[in-house]
Amino acid sequence: MGKHKNPIVQAKKSAIHGLGCFAVQFIPEGQRIVEYSGPRLNLEQTLKALEKGNEYIFDLDSHYSVDGSVMSNAGRYLNHSCDPNCESDIIFAKVWIDAMRDIHKGEEVTINYNYELEGFSNRPCQCGSKNCPGFMIANHQLGLKNPQKLLCTMMEMSNEIISQKNKNDLPPNKSTTSLF
Ligand SMILES: [Zn+2]
C-alpha cells in the first residue's frame, strides 16, 4: 500500500485478520482516507464473483458493485470491525473510506463490512471489540446498541439452524408396518 498515492495508511500484519490497514499518521475525524477502488461489476458479474469466493465485492447499490480484489485498490486490506473507526461513503459510484473519529498513528483502520444476517455463522469475527457478537454482521441488522436484543436474535438464528438441520437428519418414517 505504501507504493500507492495514499501515504496516510499502510498494510501491516493485523491481529484481526491477515494484513490490515494502519494509520501512518494521526488522522482526524471526518478525513477521507482512501478510495475503495476496482472495476465496476453489474449484478450478473457480481453474483459470479461472489460464487467464486471473491471477498472484496463492495455493493454500490442493488445493481452494481466494485470489485476491490485488484492490487491497485489501496483499501483491499481494510479489515472488518464491529466497532469500526471508519465508514464508507458512496459518491457518484465511488466508494470512499472516511474516518468516523480521530485515529491515532499506528492504529488499525477498520470498517464494518455490513454483511447481512444470512449465513452469518460462516463469517466468524475476531475484531476484539466489546460489542463483537463473534460474527461479522451489519450494525443495522442487529442493533449493536442493544446487546440483549442481539443475543436473543443470535439464539433464535442458531435454534432455527439446528431445527432445520434436525429436520433434514430425521430417519425415514419407520412407523409403517412392522411384523415383529
Ligand atoms: Zn467483531
Image: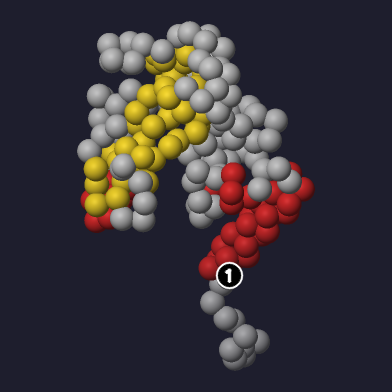
Question: Residue 22, how many percent across, how many down?
Answer: 47, 15
Q: Quadrant of the N terminus?
A: top left
**Between 60 and 155, the one nearer to me in the picture:** 60
**Between 27 and 160, the one nearer to me in the picture:** 27
Q: Quadrant of the C terminus?
A: bottom right
Residue at horizontal 64%, vertical 55%?
158
Question: Residue 143, how many percent across, how many down?
Answer: 66, 48
Residue at horizontal 46%, vertical 28%?
98
Question: Residue 44, how many percent across, how many down?
Answer: 24, 56
- Counting labels gives 1
* Element marked by disc 1: helix
Asked where in the image residue 169 lies, by quadrant, the reply is bottom right
Residue at horizontal 65%, vertical 40%?
133
**Between 179 and 42, the one nearer to me in the picture:** 42
- In this rendering, position of residue 65 left or right of residue 150: left
Amino acid type shown at disc 1: Lys
Residue at image mark 1: 167
- In this rendering, position of residue 92 left or right of residue 151: left
Residue 103 visible, this angle: yes
Residue 14 against residue 44 in the figure, above or below = above
Query: Would you say the beta carbon of the disc 1 residue lies within 8 angstroms of ligand 1?
Result: no
- In this rendering, position of residue 148 left or right of residue 21: right
Residue 53 visible, this angle: no
Residue 173 against residue 132 in the figure, above or below = below
